[in-house]
Image (cartoon, helix red, strand yellow):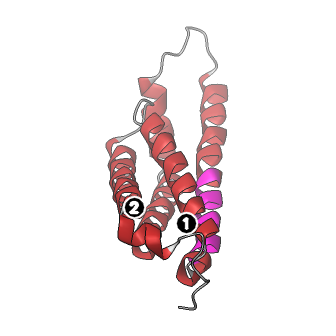
Amino acid sequence: MIVLVLANLALSALLAGLMLAFQEHLLDYQLTHIDVPAGTDMVAAREELRSSVWSRVLPVALVAFAYLMVIGGLRSGRRKAYRQVIFISVIVLLGTGLTLFQPFPWWVRAVNVAKALVVVALLFLASRPEVRSWFRRDQPTRRA
């Protein structure tokens, strides 16, 4: 599970880095693929979209931080960490799915699809009886 959590973390960091590095390309793409009413100030529209790039990068950073906090709990066999991984994974899967319906270039979609595949694999692994038994309620905390 930790490897998949780290893989999702790496993909999230990659996506955030790409969005920041190719911000102008992303903004150009979005401006050409959204309906902009006639007479709209394109400079203002571009700046509004620019602020939305940051609103996408910051949640990625928060999820990354949350995953880092949870990894220690997973290594110790804490049930709370197991539940947190499932919760965060479902949120990431929903958020990633929503981005597929927004105007993004192919590279954003590709990373999001990869993230979705990793999270689906993580949720599948977490549902396995052997993994669930590692995080049983009556299981003593382990030291890894």
Q: Nearer the viewer, residue 40 or 12?
A: 12
The residue where tag 2 is placed is 122
Magenta segment's dominant SS is helix
Rendering coords of residue 66 (x, y %):
64, 64
Residue 63 highlighted magenta (yes or no) = yes
Q: CA distance from mark 1 to mark 2?
A: 11 Å
Name which residue lies at 45% across and 31% down: 102
Q: Amino acid at mark 2?
A: Leu
Quarter of the view holding residue 141: bottom right
The residue where tag 1 is placed is 82
Rendering coords of residue 120 (x, y %):
36, 53
Rendering coords of residue 9 (x, y %):
49, 66
| 1 vs 2, front mark | 1
Q: Amino acid at mark 1?
A: Tyr
* Residue 42 against residue 49 in the figure, above or below: above
Rendering coords of residue 116 (x, y %):
38, 50
Residue stretch rendered in magenta on the structure: 59-71
Name which residue lies at 55% across and 8% down: 38
Along the horizontal axis of the image, is 86 left or right of 101? right
Name which residue lies at 46% across and 46% down: 93
Q: Residues within 10 Å of mark 2 (few under 14, many from 20)?
A: many
Residue 60 highlighted magenta (yes or no) = yes
